Image: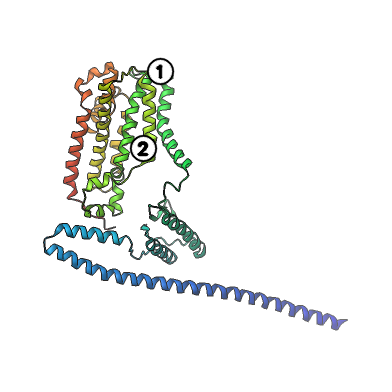
Amino acid sequence: MRKYSELKAAFDDLDKEYSELLAENLDLKYRLEELDSELSSYRVRQQDIENIAENTRRLKHDMRNHIMVIASYLSSGETQQAKEYLSVVLDKLDRVYSYIQTGNSVMNYIINTKLEYAHRNGVKFKAEIENISFAKMGSVDFSALLSNILDNAVEASIDSSRKFIYVLVCRKKGWDCITVKNGIDRSVLNKVDAIVVIFAVFLREAGGIIAMYLALQKFGSINGWSIDELLFLFSLIFITYGIFIVFFMALRDFPDWIKHGDFDRVLLRPRGVLTQLVLCGADWLAAFGHGTLGILLLIISANRVGVEWNVKTVLYYLMCVIGGVLIQGAVFLAFSAITFYVLETNSLKEIFYWNMRKFAIYPLSIYNKFIQAILIFVVPFAFVNYFPAQFFLQKPDMAGYPTWFMYITPIVGIVLYALAYAFWRFSLRFYKSTGN
């Protein structure tokens, strides 16, 4: 019996040792598989790095040849041909990239690998990256997360006519952040989504009107202006902005053109600089949202306030709309010119456009003389909606201003735009590229 107990104890010891060895063997097999996987990954990375080095070597060789051609044009005095050749070279550079260095070796590999894949498929790739280590996240999780994000962005861009990817890596409020944006065709989006966006813009702008309407249910009017007259006043602001954003979206976002280096390409193309900016695209969703609201307010208010439509009034209204669009275009053209001196102009836009626009949706006569002077002579929103509305409504508070102010909105628009254009042409000579 005692011998049996000794044998059982020895067996248990051997069984325990066997289990430990088996577990250790499984761990070693698992570790071997991991090492094999890492080895394969390293080999792929090595090949990618070799490809990058080869692309860099070819780029250096090509650039030397391009510089010789450009130098030949310039030495012969053929400046226009040199510009056209530079434009072609810049377009070709969209398919070539430089190695991106970050503060994280895993991110270096992933971003540069995806960047090369994107360029092979004709997708533009822009990156703004701070030196961040992302030490709080394990390399496996980080690699899987970033790879999936970029894979999805590249695949979506390949199938889109708007082939671009924008990557922003920065620290915000103590958090390490990665932002990825990519192009996608409108046809890919569900039509309901576009309608929702337009409706959201519509509701955002209509919120202030609804609040004002509810307030006037108690007070009746603002300085003698009824709710319907105010709606007519509002309609001009929204209609003109809806048209403005179709033609001048690039001027609204002009600082981004300089920051990202897109303006360099515009300068080298054999076309008018401002013409290219005007024709580059439109914010159609914002245009539909503002335009729909403006037209709806016009339909609701025009008959109620007694507007008589005939050839004279229709022609006057159309001229005032064109003048209002030119006034707002001139304001943003001036801001764009200021960008050549001070790259960041969003604060100026906030003060002198967006805040003044909030003032302009109410009758000019309710403000003190200082605000009135700004809205007439500095940022002349009064000529966008107040004085044109007075032509139709003939309100008593117009007595405080020259009568001819009601008729000069188109002239103000043309003159102001001409002055802004002259300032733009003068300031253009001081442009300095960011080198991006």
Query: Which residue occupies the foreground of this view, 15 or 263?
Result: 263
Q: Is residue 387 above or below residue 188?
A: above
Which label sits on residue 287? 2
Give the secondary structure at mark 1.
helix
Of the residues shown, which amino acid type is indicated by label 1?
Phe
Give the secondary structure at mark 2.
helix
Residue 425 in the image: state x and y as whole percent: 17, 45
**Residue that extends furthest to the bottom in the rendered view of this protein:** 3
Picture quadrant where residue 26 is located: bottom right
Quadrant where the N terminus lies?
bottom right
Which label sits on residue 260? none
Left or right of residue 77: residue 118? right
Q: Residue at x 18, y 50 (%)?
A: 430
Q: Earlier in the sequence, mark 2 or mark 1?
A: 1
Specify few, some or many for label 2: CA neighbours under 10 Å numbering under 14, 14-19, or 20 or more: many
Q: Residue at x 41, y 55 (%)?
A: 157
Residue 388 in the image: state x and y as whole percent: 27, 24
Which label sits on residue 219? 1
Picture quadrant where residue 417 is located: top left
Q: Residue at x 35, y 42 (%)?
A: 283
Of the residues shown, which amino acid type is indicated by label 2?
Ala
Residue 220 in the image: state x and y as whole percent: 40, 17
Picture quadrant where residue 107 is located: bottom left
